[in-house]
Amino acid sequence: KNEVEQSPQNLTAQEGEFITINCSYSVGISALHWLQQHPGGGIVSLFMLSSGKKKHGRLIATINIQEKHSSLHITASHPRDSAVYICAVPLKETSGSRLTFGEGTQLTVNP
Amino acid sequence: DTAVSQTPKYLVTQMGNDKSIKCEQNLGHDTMYWYKQDSKKFLKIMFSYNNKELIINETVPNRFSPKSPDKAHLNLHINSLELGDSAVYFCASSPRRGLAGVFHYEQYFGPGTRLTVT
């Protein structure tokens, strides 16, 4: 079992739909990253959050530290949102932190 | 201006060769990283440097050696390349290590270097 699990693995939506991608992790953490990997391969950081909720344009990220769960929402989805969305968690180890990634969610938004 | 740049973008080489990938950031960040993305698109951290000091060294073969001549550069040298080294390697940087821990700051990724070992 991965320490960081995402669901769903693949998601296909129609333009305009509300999208939710989930991330669960197995150990306590104090921060979580959401990344977007474009079809061309580039990776962009969307959010780094440690509590509550953050919003940027049509993207909203929430985290519940007690439940070890985070969600990424996309409102009014558009074909240009098609990408792989990855959550990453710094898992504490004795030597510091190790950023551990989920396997990613492939999102395809059809026009 | 590119914030985090990597060269080369593509690298095709034969088994047994030695190769380097260079990374530079012009963001004034203190911390830099190397990540490997395998064929299944799974990302794993390899190394992290903070102000030229190695702070994370994951379980990677000794054939991989990072070098940070200054805090704006983090290069990755790979000796005796093997087929399994084929992957996309991403460099990244973040503003500072800070008291909260190295991964509590936003990461800025380079465009990636696709390494193919034949």
Image: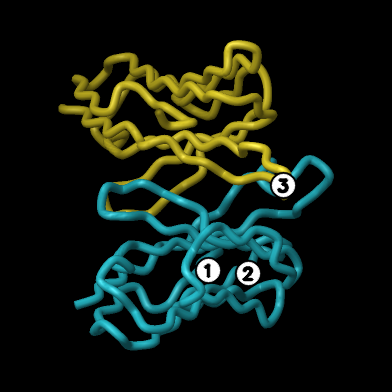
Chain colours: A yellow, B cyan
Query: Where does residue B74 sit, x and y in percent of width and height?
Result: 59, 73
Q: Chain of mark 3?
A: A
Three-letter amino acid code of the residue under disc 2: Asn
Mark 1 against mark 2, which lies toward the viewer? 2
Q: What count of labels does the image hold?
A: 3
The tag earlier along the polypeptide, 1 or 2, is 1
Q: Chain of mark 2?
A: B
Which residue is tagged 1? B1
Residue nearest the observer in this picture, A96 or A85: A96
Q: Which mark is residue A96?
A: 3
Q: Which mark is residue B26?
A: 2
Three-letter amino acid code of the residue under disc 3: Gly
Say whether residue B76 is left or right of residue B86.
right
Three-letter amino acid code of the residue under disc 1: Asp
- The single residue placed furthest to the right in the displayed view is B99
Q: Chain of mark 1?
A: B
